[in-house]
Amino acid sequence: GSGLSAPSGIPTFRGAEGVWAKWVLEWGTRAAFLADPRGWYDNFWIPAHVVAEPGSTSERTYEPSAGHFAVAEVAACRQTNVHVITQNIDGLHQRAGLPSERLVEVHGRAGLLKCVSPG
């Protein structure tokens, strides 16, 4: 969960200072997106979700925590059949070296966007 990424400096989703408390009720709906797509990205998605890759010009670059590296190490062992299912969208499991065939990112990953326009 998001607690694994908290040591990396990423706020938890439901914590007192997390994404839910700050933005979800106002911006975290499809209706808010459809009413103001640019405002939705500028005021909700980018500040709450975007995690810059190393080498990016963004000031918001995060590194995997010791926990991410430990999980990746266990999952990489040939003697194990460990798979990780995460709701985190920060991509830190993958950046820690977790094999992609052993990772399911239920909510996707920041930086992987999909157009919702029917045209």
Image (cartoon, helix red, strand yellow):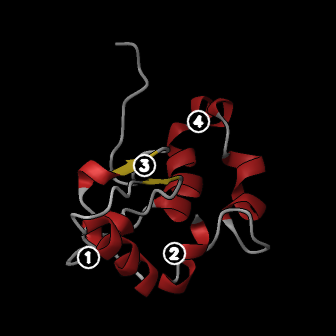
Which one is nearer the viewer's eye here, 49 or 109? 109
x 37%, y 29%: residue: 115
Mark 2 vs mark 4, CA separation in Å: 26 Å
Q: Residues within 10 Å of mark 2 (few under 14, many from 20)?
A: many
Please identify, in this view, whether the residue under mark 4 or under mark 3 is nearer the observer: 3
CB within 8 Å, label 1 to label 2: no
> On the picture, is 57 further left or further right than 3?
left
Residue corresponding to mark 3? 105
Q: Residues within 10 Å of mark 3 (few under 14, many from 20)?
A: some
Q: Position of residue 27 (x, y in %)?
A: 68, 47
Mark 4 vs mark 1, CA separation in Å: 26 Å
- Residue type of the residue flagged with mark 1: Thr
x 66%, y 63%: residue: 13
x 25%, y 67%: residue: 76
Residue corresponding to mark 2? 5
Image quarter in which the N terminus is found: bottom right
- Residue type of the residue flagged with mark 4: Phe
What number of labels is visible?
4
Which one is nearer the viewer's eye here, 43 or 91? 91
Which one is nearer the viewer's eye here, 115 or 91? 91
Residue corresponding to mark 4? 33
Query: If you read the primary sequence from the N terminus, does the residue marked by circle 1 or circle 2 appear first?
Result: 2
Please identify, in this view, whether the residue under mark 1 or under mark 2 is nearer the observer: 2
CB within 8 Å, label 2 to label 4: no
CB within 8 Å, label 3 to label 1: no
Q: Position of residue 72 (x, y in %)?
A: 32, 71
Give the quadrant of residue 21: bottom right
Please identify, in this view, whether the residue under mark 2 or under mark 4 is nearer the observer: 2
Mark 1 vs mark 2, CA separation in Å: 21 Å
